[in-house]
């Protein structure tokens, strides 16, 4: 009798453990699938803004609403979101960040006053741009339908307002993903892009709460 009692008592625990393992495996699978979909959709480069926005929408639906069919949500967002508007909203800040990096590389070798001034302005502009990217990703996926100029202005204001709070977090996330990719490029296939997007969205959400904009 005591042996049977222990066996019966242990059965629910085994079931709960098995359910937890399956849920974890399903989450890992969804994460890798979404990452692969993002990489494939970004291959033409010009589709990068649309792909990033679609992955951001799928992450929102998965995290906030429990919708774990991330590939379906990703494809739905690709088809349903206006491609031109999405490209403009997300693509221009991404292009600005890339131009900022090129500008810094251009002025970095210089030793004269013009080079120092250009390097300082370029670093400041790049810092603000990178600090605003998380808000761009978050609000483009679920924010209000603002005109592009107002949308970017809002993201920049949030970046400046929270510069000492979320700014270092954004820089650490971007730097960490960049270093991992440079050290081991195959990590791109193991989730680095989606992980970076997820972390930046979490940081941006924290910044929205600090700014009192909880409705987004």
Image: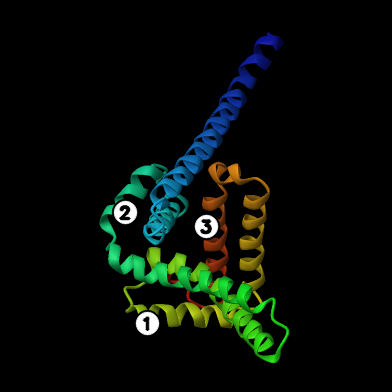
Which residue shows up at 62% across the image and 51% down it? Answer: 181
Who is closer to the viewer here, 212 or 56?
56
Judged from this view, the residue extending furthest toward the right is: 111
Judged from this view, the residue extending furthest toward the bottom is: 113
Instruction: Name the residue that disc number 3 marks.
Output: 197
Q: Is residue 91 above or below residue 128?
A: above
Which residue shows up at 52% across the image and 69% down it? Answer: 98
Count neighbours of disc 2 (C-alpha within 10 A) and say few if under 14, some if 14 to 19, many if 20 or more: many
Q: Position of residue 132 (x, y in %)?
A: 52, 74
* N-terminal label among 3 and 2: 2
Judged from this view, the residue extending furthest toward the top is: 1
Q: Quadrant of the N terminus?
A: top right
Q: Position of residue 180 (x, y in %)?
A: 66, 51
Who is closer to the viewer here, 96 or 170?
96
Q: Determine whether the residue tagged by mark 3 lies in a helix, strand or loop.
A: helix
Separation of residues labelled 3 and 2 (CA atoms): 17 Å
* N-terminal label among 1 and 2: 2
Q: Determine whether the residue tagged by mark 1 lies in a helix, strand or loop.
A: helix
Instruction: Name the residue that disc number 2 marks.
Output: 78
Q: Which mark is residue 149?
A: 1
Q: Determine whether the residue tagged by mark 2 lies in a helix, strand or loop.
A: helix
Q: Is residue 204 above or below residue 212?
A: above
Who is closer to the viewer here, 150 or 88?
88
Separation of residues labelled 1 and 2 (CA atoms): 23 Å
Q: Position of residue 213 (x, y in %)?
A: 48, 76
């Amino acid at each position: 009798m005591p042996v049977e009692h222990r066996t019966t008592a242990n059965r629910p625990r085994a079931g709960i453990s098995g359910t937890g393992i399956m849920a974890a495996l399903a989450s890992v699978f969804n994460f890798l699938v979404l990452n692969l979909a993002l990489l494939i959709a970004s291959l033409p480069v010009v589709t990068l803004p649309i792909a990033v926005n679609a992955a951001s929408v799928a992450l929102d639906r998965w995290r906030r609403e429990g919708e774990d069919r991330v590939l379906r949500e990703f494809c739905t967002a690709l088809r349903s979101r206006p491609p031109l508007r999405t490209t403009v909203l997300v693509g221009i800040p991404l292009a600005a960040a890339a131009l900022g990096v090129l500008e810094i590389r251009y002025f970095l070798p210089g030793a004269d006053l013009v080079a120092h001034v250009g390097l300082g302005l370029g670093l400041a502009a790049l810092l603000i741009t990178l600090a605003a990217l998380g808000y761009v990703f978050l609000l483009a996926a679920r924010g209000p339908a603002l005109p592009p100029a107002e949308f970017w202005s809002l993201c920049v204001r949030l970046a400046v307002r929270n510069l000492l709070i979320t700014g270092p977090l954004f820089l650490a996330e971007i730097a960490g993903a960049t270093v991992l990719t440079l050290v081991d490029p195959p990590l791109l296939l193991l989730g680095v892009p989606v992980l970076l997007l997820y972390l930046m969205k979490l940081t941006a959400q924290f910044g929205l709460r600090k700014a009192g904009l909880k409705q987004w």
